[in-house]
Image (cartoon, helix red, strand yellow):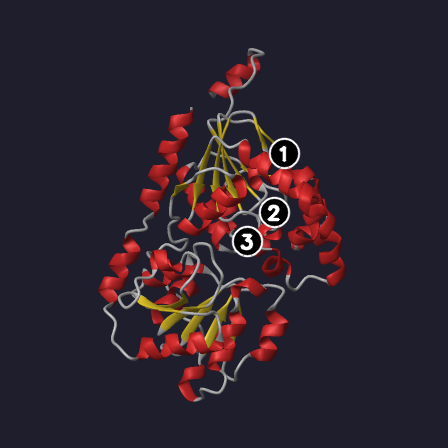
Amino acid sequence: MTGSRRDRAAGRPEPRPPVAIAHDYLTQRGGAERVVLALQAAFPDAAIHTTVHQPDTTFPQFDRSEVLTTPLQRIGPLRRNPRLALPVLAPVVSRIQVDAEVTVCSSTGWAHGVHATGAKVVYLHNTARWLYQRDEYLDGLPPWYRLGLVPLARPLRRWDRRAAASADVVLVNSAVTRERVRRNWGRDAEILHPPPGLARAGEHRPVAGLEPGFLLTVARLLPYKRVDAVLAALRGLGGADTRLVVVGSGPDRARLEALAPAGTRWLGDVADEQLRWLYANAEALVTAAHDDFGLTPLEAMQFGTPVVAVREGGFPETVADGQTGVLFDGASADGVRAGLEALRGRSWDRALIEDRAAAFSPEAFAARVRAVVAGLR
């Protein structure tokens, strides 16, 4: 009989779990969700608390943990697109009760608002885009919906700052996010770079009909990922230069497909086995995204693949310009083209690129998070 069963048999309350994990919603295969997988690996016995969980559109590894959801789980449209629930997410998240000695919140704007009975650690990917970067986050949503959110901005900012004040420790993914925490929350934070979400070791499965040497973009298809700038850069180049492979899904896909040059392959979400092969066989990863850290460059660099990335957000913290890739100025077609010209104007040391990625190890990430949690117990 386990200790918890003995406690129940004796009529004593069960001890609180040492650690729990909270995340906004588990519906995507994005960088934030890969960080939750890293937290899951660091605390394999921890339950994961979230608003909604859509198993067929996120990582299957979450099924290894107990995933606890809210009543929103029963509403199909909100489960499939949680952004539509934005007006009600604050009160819903506030009602999530997490009973653990330490709750580790992976937050892009909501999870730090859960009610934790013990200490709270917030790992912040970015302060809430819909409050502080509204245009890029809400772009693509219906005008009536965007207009309806205007009167909610002030109360949501108050809620956001109260939730931030409830954290005992704030960890952030990059210097960019730390500066936003200072500006929007009025507090300091420790930078802890996330590890590559995709492990280098593992099976490689080729994509049928695809020869090595293509350009690769890996992103959720949302406006702020700026896949349109990459597509515009490749239009008109002709020949092999137009061999672009796009991995990812999202509501912006139809618009982007209309902009794509001939020869673009749209793969949607792919299994990790195929993603490893894609990274290892690409000429380069290309991104113009507005990412506060950005995991895909690290994932590509693990395989010795150089990166062409816009010089903003978290990319300068991971891509060593001229050594592991090219940083270009301006998230525009001209900027991307300039980056590709610089890429093809020199040779690349794949071993050096792999070494740079190794500095961002899952082991270092897990060790630091565990140390923070241990200091609060």
**Sequence-first tag of 3 and 2:** 2
Question: What residue type is disc 1 on?
Answer: Ile
Q: CA distance from mark 1 to mark 2?
A: 14 Å
Quarter of the picture holding the C terminus:
top left
Question: What residue type is disc 2 on?
Answer: His
The residue lying toward the viewer, choosing from 270 and 92, is 92
Single out the mark in the foreground, 1 or 2.
1
The residue lying toward the viewer, choosing from 370 and 187, is 187
Disc 1 element: loop
Q: CA distance from mark 1 to mark 3?
A: 21 Å
- State which quadrant residue 9 falls in: top right
Badge 3: residue crowd in 10 Å (few <14, some 14–19, many ≥20): some
Disc 3 element: loop
371 over 176 or under it: above or below: above
Report the residue at 43% width, 74% height from top: 335
Residue 270 percent location from the top left of the image: 49, 63
Numbered tag placed on residue 58 in the rendering: 3
**Sequence-first tag of 1 and 3:** 3
Q: CA distance from mark 3 to mark 2?
A: 8 Å
Badge 1: residue crowd in 10 Å (few <14, some 14–19, many ≥20): many
Residue 259 percent location from the top left of the image: 58, 79
**Sequence-first tag of 1 and 2:** 2
Numbered tag placed on residue 53 in the rendering: 2
Q: Residue tagged by mark 1?
A: 96
| Residues at marks 1 and 2 touching, judged by CB atoms closer than 8 Å | no
Is residue 276 shown to the viewer in this render? yes
Report the residue at 38% width, 44% height from top: 192
Residue 352 percent location from the top left of the image: 23, 63
| Residues at marks 1 and 3 touching, judged by CB atoms closer than 8 Å | no
| Residues at marks 3 and 2 touching, judged by CB atoms closer than 8 Å | yes
Residue 51 percent location from the top left of the image: 63, 42
